[in-house]
Amino acid sequence: MEVQKYSGAGNSFIITDNRNSDITDYHKNVIDLMEKFPGTDGVIYLENSGHADFKMNYFNRDGTGDALCGNGLRCTVKFISDNGISDSNKLKIEAVSHNYECEIISGNEISVKFPPPVTVKTNFRLKVHFQEWWELLKCSYVDIGSPHIVVFTDDIEKPKVNSIEEVNVSEWGRNIRMHKDLMPEGANVNFAEITGSGQLAIRSFERGVEAETLACGTGSISAALIYYITREQCKPVRLLTRSGKYLKVDFEICEKKLKSITLSGDAEKITL
């Protein structure tokens, strides 16, 4: 089995062409690959689709599947292009029973169009354990095909944090991700800091990876959307990820209704 490694704004994946359906035991294969390539965030199988150009079958590092990955979609398109599987700059990629319109803008820059989120809930409180005390933390929730909690750093009252660098993503993210009010599926957790008009810094704790990742595409969409709804009417939104690279999120608004969301950023092959 030939595999290649790709990165979308720092979010890294092993990708393999499974259009011949040679791989059927996904869980075992994922675990084997993650042992061979430690530090990688997940595995993508390129497969055939009955109603799109191709299918992205994505699995988290722990072997759980049926997951959506925004950065993974961009990396899938780059993999298809790099390997001469298609020469089209515009592709429809199936993922988790939905088709996503993807476009190679130029070079490594790729955009993906998403439908409006299934669920959005803003400014509710979760009782969260921070270090030696509990806090009723102001949060928002977005289901954009995968569930996300968004927390703005200026809403963290105790302990007060002065910047996103002070956020204990490993501990706080895990506590929120496993919160009883979010179970049984839990949620990804995104901490965001407003750094300017239309500008956010973001750090993400991803379920399935069970750790902080260098970037999260659907997490960036979720944070940008909550920022747009609750803080100021500003778009597009640029997000500085933990990798130091930027993702851009834009919204198509028609008659005050959200029609679609576009995520754009880089995707590149990494030498194994």
Image (cartoon, rainbow, N blue to C red):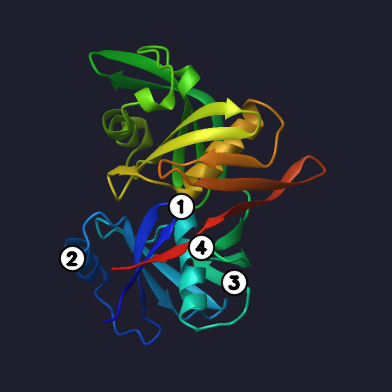
C-alpha span from label 2 to label 4 = 23 Å
Is residue 44 something one can see in this rendering?
Answer: yes
Q: Nearer the N terminus, badge 4 or badge 3?
A: 4
Give, as a three-letter code, the residue at label 3: Lys
Nearer to the camera, 226 or 127: 226
Residue wearing tag 3: 92
Residue wearing tag 2: 36
C-alpha span from label 1 to label 2 = 22 Å
Q: Is residue 55 above or below residue 218?
A: below
Element type where label 4 sits in the image: helix
Q: Is residue 115 left or right of residue 204?
A: right
Q: Is residue 43 above or below residue 185?
A: below
Q: Dot 4: within a 10 Å radius of its alpha carbon, few (fewer than 14), some, or many (20 or more) residues?
A: many
* Whole-percent x, y for residue 1 in the image: 26, 82
Q: Nearer the N terminus, badge 1 or badge 2?
A: 1
* Whole-percent x, y for residue 123 in the image: 54, 24
* Whole-percent x, y for residue 104 in the image: 61, 67
Give, as a three-letter code, the residue at label 2: Lys
Nearer to the camera, 234 or 185: 234
Give, as a three-letter code, the residue at label 1: Ala
